Image (tube, grey):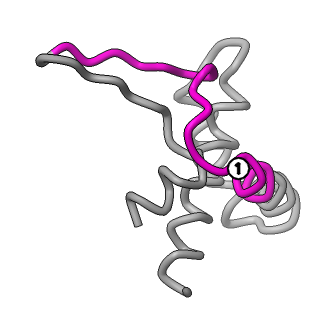
Amino acid sequence: ARNYSSYCRVVPGIGSSSGVVRRRGRQSKQGNATLKWAFNQAATHAVRSYPRIRSYFDRQLAKHVGRAGKLVVYNTVAHKLAVAAFHIL
């Protein structure tokens, strides 16, 4: 599930070299961009349509304040959907 999520680009990219870990953020182009788009669209629709996912979204949004908080939480929901899709496959 971890490798599949990474391939779908729904986890933050991490680069490490000799014990130094740095995040790569948005500039990382590793993985499948189409799957990232699809899971983000599914996350947006799921938040709008399912009350249980909406409550999870609201709880996570309270933890992530700032301008990009909503985008981070949508990506968290997309990651959960990718893990669920992996287990179904």
Residue wearing tag 1: 36
Which quadrant is the C terminus positioned in? bottom right
Quadrant of residue 72 within the rendered picture: top right
Give x and y (percent) for residue 37: 79, 49
SS of the residue under disc 1 = helix
Residue located farthest toward the bottom when viewing the structure as drawn: 88
**Residues in magenta?**
20-40
The residue sitting at 77% across, 53% down in the picture is 34
From the viewer's perspective, is 21 left or right of 15?
A: left
Give x and y (percent) for residue 49: 86, 66
From the viewer's perspective, is 46 left or right of 52?
A: right
Circle 1 packing at 10 Å, graded few (<14), some (14-19), many (20+), is: many
The residue sitting at 61% across, 18% down in the picture is 65
71 or 19, which is in the foreground?
A: 19
Give x and y (percent) for residue 83: 50, 67
Question: Is 22 above or below relative to 51?
Answer: above
25 or 52, which is in the foreground?
A: 25
Of the residues shown, which amino acid type is indicated by label 1? Lys
The residue sitting at 12% across, 18% down in the picture is 19
* Tag count: 1
> Does the magenta portion include 68?
no
From the viewer's perspective, is 82 left or right of 18?
A: right
39 or 66, which is in the foreground?
A: 39
Residue located farthest toward the left when viewing the structure as drawn: 19
Give x and y (percent) for residue 32: 66, 51
The residue sitting at 72% across, 30% down in the picture is 70
Which quadrant is the N terminus positioned in? bottom left
> Does the magenta portion include 29?
yes
